[in-house]
């Protein structure tokens, strides 16, 4: 029987399995969409500054950072079914935790719930991304993942709506209910994922294996060609890792005093970098050509992904702050939350259109152009040009849409058997979403939300540079056998 979009060469049809896996994309899009509404909620209910409320994003992306490699290992051991069920149960634990967290009514309690949910979502992303690419004929892998991405975008649209409904609810007298109803959407998510876990336990979940595609990227010449670039990019990745670890250490320090954040962050990051840099240089000079770090297009992707998710999380986090303070006619929190859903509609539309563009044009060139456009748009927002700046924010959503999956695909292109290991590191790189909102929030506290868009502006510069230089880093003109993942 001829293979098709959901039918493999052995004649089996996996449409039902694909539909179930696609529901996971919708789930994490919904959870991510609520995060940014929660950010503004805590600013008002707990009297937090913008920089302080960014701990919500930190907790969310910390879950991804800590669980990316363990999730990949566990998923390998348990298979697709086991990895998905483990992730769903962890999401359920995080969702149910919001019930006692509401009674505790302390910021740390809510952050713990956010981190637990993100840890569970890490499992789902680690498993669902590659699984969709093998649920049918290989030539339709990109088509399947793009269909799944649309579910992710739908989840982003409805997340802020649910957040606005329960985070900004009022009683019969019109007074804010505070944190009293915050647990409801998360408890509902917990109920849904428990049902999904039961469904996945019985559903057909064949452990299919995709074809590995050996390419020029596996050749020893790759390391020789990219020697200097590999060393430079490895050191830059080390610096990013140092800042990530420093941020985790400083998160513990601020429990005792908020004033410790900057000195502990700077000190611990510098200490880690000084101690690890010599070993990294020695490793780079004797690097095995088979190492994924010997491929500049991969190590460049981890940096570009760090920068992109940093920009995305910052813009998403402060969208409501922007709409309630900066436009010519500021709106209410509830209205701004609804407008966030409009932004995610732009994001969803961008994914559909972008998916078509990267089929007709070189993906890395489209990425570079999109990066430059968003640099210009961020500058427009900073210029405080009235409604033109407001429109610019929505257009930024549109041009961010394809960045995560495109960077991912470009990073793993041609890595053959090393693709799965490389994927875990690229997922870890989204720690940028935990760090940059703190910086963007600090800039906004000192100046304005509009001015804080200078932070994502520089992030999009990094993305554009990676896109335009990908051919030089990868040593080829176009990606080879790179599946496009869903996610952020």
Image: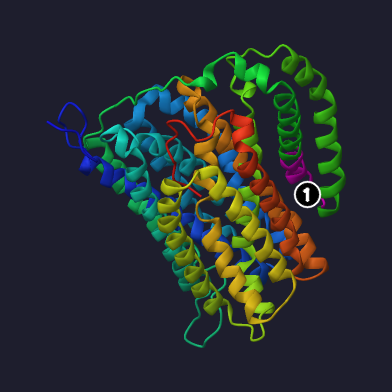
**Label 1: which secondary element:** loop
Q: State the residue at coordinates (71%, 21%).
A: 227
How far across and how far down the image is residue 432, in percent?
66, 45
Direction from residue 148 to residue 14 in the image, left or right: left
Observer-nearest of 238 and 100: 238
How far across and how far down the image is residue 179, in percent?
55, 67
Main secondary structure found in the magenta portion: helix
Q: State the residue at coordinates (55%, 30%).
A: 476
What residue would you read off at disc 1?
254
Observer-nearest of 369 and 451: 369
Q: Does residue 380 appear anywhere in the picture?
A: yes
Q: Residues within 10 Å of mark 1 (few under 14, many from 20)?
A: some
Question: Above or below — where is 146 with respect to 52?
Answer: above
Q: Number of numbered discs present?
A: 1
Tell me the quarter of the image containing the N terminus.
top left
Direction from residue 2 to residue 98 in the image, left or right: right
Q: Which residues are magenta?
A: 246-257
How far across and how far down the image is residue 153, in percent?
42, 57
Observer-nearest of 50 and 426: 426
């Amino acid at each position: 029987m001829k293979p098709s979009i959901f039918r493999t060469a052995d004649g089996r049809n996996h449409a039902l399995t694909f539909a179930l896996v696609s529901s996971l994309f919708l789930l994490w899009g919904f959870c991510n969409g609520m995060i940014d509404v929660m950010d503004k909620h805590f600013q008002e209910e707990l009297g937090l500054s913008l920089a302080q409320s960014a701990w919500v994003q930190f907790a969310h992306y910390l879950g991804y950072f800590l669980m990316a490699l363990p999730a990949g290992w566990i998923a390998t051991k348990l298979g697709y079914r086991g990895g998905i069920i483990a992730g769903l149960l962890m999401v359920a634990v995080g969702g149910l935790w919001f019930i006692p967290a509401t009674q505790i009514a302390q910021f740390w309690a809510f952050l713990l719930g956010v981190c637990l949910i993100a840890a569970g979502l890490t499992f789902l992303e680690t498993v669902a991304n590659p699984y969709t690419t093998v649920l049918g004929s290989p030539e339709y892998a990109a088509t399947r993942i793009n269909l799944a991405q649309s579910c992710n975008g739908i989840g982003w649209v409805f997340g802020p709506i649910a957040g606005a409904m329960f985070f900004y609810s009022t009683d019969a007298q019109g007074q804010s209910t505070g944190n009293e109803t915050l647990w409801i959407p998360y408890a509902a998510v917990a109920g849904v994922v428990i049902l999904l876990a039961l469904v996945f336990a019985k559903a057909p979940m064949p452990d299919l294996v995709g074809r590995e595609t050996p390419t020029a990227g596996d050749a020893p010449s790759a390391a020789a060609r990219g020697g200097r670039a590999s060393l430079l990019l490895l050191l830059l990745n080390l610096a990013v890792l140092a800042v990530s670890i420093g941020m985790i250490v400083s998160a513990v320090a601020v429990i005792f005093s908020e004033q410790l954040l900057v000195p502990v962050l700077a000190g611990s990051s510098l200490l880690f970098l000084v101690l690890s840099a010599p070993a990294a240089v020695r490793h780079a000079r004797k690097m095995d050509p088979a190492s994924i770090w010997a491929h500049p297009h991969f190590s460049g992707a981890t940096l570009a992904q760090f920068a992109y998710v940093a920009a995305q999380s910052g813009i998403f986090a402060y969208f409501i702050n922007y709409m309630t303070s900066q436009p010519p006619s500021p709106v209410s929190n509830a209205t701004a939350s609804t407008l966030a859903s409009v932004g995610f509609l732009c994001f969803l539309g961008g994914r559909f259109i972008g998916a078509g563009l990267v089929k007709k044009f070189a993906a890395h060139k489209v990425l570079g152009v999109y990066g430059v456009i968003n640099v210009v748009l961020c500058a427009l927002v900073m210029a405080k040009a009235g409604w033109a700046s407001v429109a610019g924010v929505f257009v930024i959503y549109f041009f961010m849409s394809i960045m995560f999956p495109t960077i991912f695909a470009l990073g793993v292109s041609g890595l053959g058997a090393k693709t799965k290991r490389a994927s875990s590191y690229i997922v870890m790189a989204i720690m940028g979403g935990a760090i940059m909102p703190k910086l963007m929030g600090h800039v906004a506290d000192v100046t304005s939300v509009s001015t804080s868009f200078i932070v994502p502006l520089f992030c999009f510069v990094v993305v554009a540079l990676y896109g335009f230089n990908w051919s030089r880093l990868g040593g080829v003109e176009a990606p080879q056998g790179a599946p496009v993942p869903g996610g952020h």
